[in-house]
Structure formats: structure tokens, C-alpha cells
Amino acid sequence: MCGTGIATSTVVTGKVKEWLKDNNLDDKVSLHQSKISDELGRIDDYDVIISTTLVPENVKEKVIDGVPLLTGMGIDEMYDKVLQKLNS
């Protein structure tokens, strides 16, 4: 998710899809690209949220910072967090 559901979320979605495929997880995960304001009422529908924008405090538990996918720094740590969420 990003602020508008268009720009950075498109980049992040593409990279996550590729990572899922490379790790044989693509058939186990369903991805949804959106803007955070559209999803606040449906947060409980998701196991993991990768966001490139600020999120309200009450949903931070499910949110993983997706900025590493834009900067190239901290990507492995970010994907480790995704795996932990998916496996819990």
C-alpha cells in the first residue's frame, strides 16, 4: 500500500510478486495493491501489509515497511519479516 495506490505500490507489488515466485510462495499468497485509506476498514482481512506510507498506530502490528524495496537497503530484513508474518 502507498498513499495513492498507484506509484510506489506498483513498484513494490512487482518486486514482491517476483520474490514470491523465486521462493515458490506465489501460489500460497494473494496480493492486493491499494491505498491505505481504502483499506483501513478491511485491515483484519490481511495477514501482512507492506506499506510505503505512514499508517495509523492501530494497524501497525500487521504493517511491514516497504521502503527498502524502493531504496535497495534492508531488503533481506524486510523479506525476513514477511516470512515471519506468513509463517505465524
Image: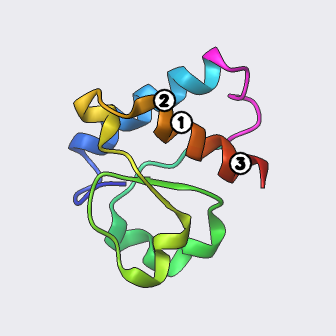
- The quadrant where residue 56 appears: bottom left
Q: Do the residues labelled 3 and 1 touch (CB within 8 Å)?
A: no
Residue drawn at x 59%, y 44% is 82
Residue located beneath label 3 in the image: 86
Cα separation between marks 3 and 1: 10 Å
- Secondary structure mostly taken by the magenta-highlighted segment of the chain: loop
**The residue under label 3 is which amino acid type?**
Leu
Quadrant location of the C terminus in the rendered image: bottom right
Looking at the image, residue 13 lies above or below residue 84 = above
Binning the other alpha carbons within 10 Å of mark 1 as few (below 14), some (14 to 19) or many (20 upward) gives: some
Q: Are marks 2 and 3 in contact (CB under 8 Å)?
A: no
Quadrant location of the N terminus in the rendered image: bottom left
User: What percent of the width, then of the height, locates residue 54?
Assistant: 27, 67
**The residue under label 2 is which amino acid type?**
Asp
Residue drawn at x 55%, y 23% is 19
Residue drawn at x 69%, y 40% is 29
SS for tag 1?
helix
Q: Are marks 2 and 1 in contact (CB under 8 Å)?
A: yes
Horizontally, is 55 left or right of 26 in the view?
left
- The quadrant where residue 67 appears: top left
**The residue under label 1 is which amino acid type?**
Tyr
Looking at the image, residue 77 lies above or below residue 54 = above
- Queried whether the magenta region covers residue 69, the answer comes back as no
Of mark 2 and mark 3, the one earlier in the sequence is: 2
The one of 83 and 19 positioned closer to us in this rendering: 83
Q: What stretch is highlighted in magenta?
A: 22-29
Cα separation between marks 2 and 3: 15 Å
User: What percent of the width, then of the height, locates residue 37?
Assistant: 33, 73
- Queried whether the magenta region covers residue 23, the answer comes back as yes
Residue located beneath label 1 in the image: 79
Binning the other alpha carbons within 10 Å of mark 2 as few (below 14), some (14 to 19) or many (20 upward) gives: few
Residue located beneath label 2 in the image: 76
